[in-house]
Image (spheres, helix red, strand yellow):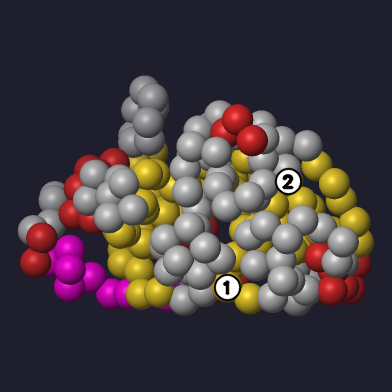
Amino acid sequence: MNLRLQAIKCLGIAIPAMMLSSCNDSDMGPEGSDIVVREIPDAHRDFKLVDTSRERFRYQTRPASSADAGQSTGPRLVYATPKGWTDEGRSMMRDVNISFGENGEGECYVARLPGAGGGLSANVNRWRKQMGADPLSDEDVFALPKKKLFGQPATFMSVDGDFTGMGASGAQKDYRLLGVILSADTGAIFVKMTGPRRLVEANAAQFDEFVSSLDVTTGN
């Protein structure tokens, strides 16, 4: 499968959680893949991704590939965009934005919050509320299935309903939300996918592929 590899380069050990600005440097990677490296200004070091190359979120890290040769040695977020998905770049509060579907009606994003991000149950139930679903108890939240995210067990949820996103004037009928949350005292990271139910169902394998591809290189 022809995947487009992406890399976000941290200056030092921090990536901002808000108002991310960047400059791009592209090169050709293996099998014609575009390698994209995004610089992070020093002024935006307000959210720690890692204290060392292996701690903070306890991210699984891997040595930089040959395609990264000559780049900065700081940790970088790396991911693969599944075939048929379109990388829309970064935006406020989101490190990654991806669209899919014939008209781009499906979306998948990666976001991070400092601290506990409100707590696991609060975030699960916030997403459930967006789908018009009843909240879960803490016990039910902790019993949700897990998926690996950065080598760690993260909470996975799937919920169908009528989706009302932030700022939306009305609900979008017959939607599905897939989400993965990795939560710790030092921060939380979210991978969220929404779209028409049948479209999301058809792209469930791509979602797993994307989540599995997320990694942090040490630059070593």
Residue type at tag 2: Arg
The disc label shown at residue 210, or none: none
- Which quadrant of the figure contains the N terminus? bottom right
Q: Nearer the viewer, residue 114 or 191?
A: 114
Q: Is residue 165 above or below residue 113?
A: above
- Cα–Cα gap, marks 2 and 1: 18 Å
- Residue 81, given in percent of the width and then of the height, sits at 68, 61
For the point 80% across and 42% down, the residue is 24
Where on the picture, by quarter, is residue 171?
Answer: top left
The disc label shown at residue 61, or none: 1
- Residue 82, given in percent of the width and then of the height, sits at 67, 65
Task: Answer left or right for 52 relative to 138.
Answer: right
- Residue 94, given in percent of the width and then of the height, sits at 52, 41
**What secondary structure is found at the residue carrying circle 2?**
strand
For the point 51% across and 74% down, the residue is 60
Q: Can you see residue 160?
A: no
Where on the picture, by quarter, is residue 136?
Answer: bottom left
Task: Answer left or right for 31 relative to 193.
Answer: right
**Residue hosting label 2:** 38
Task: Answer left or right for 111 relative to 158.
Answer: right
Q: Is residue 148 above or below residue 49?
A: below
For the point 48% across and 37% down, the residue is 46
Q: Can you see residue 40?
A: yes
Range of magenta residues = 140-149
- Which quadrant of the figure contains the C terminus? bottom right
Residue type at tag 1: Thr
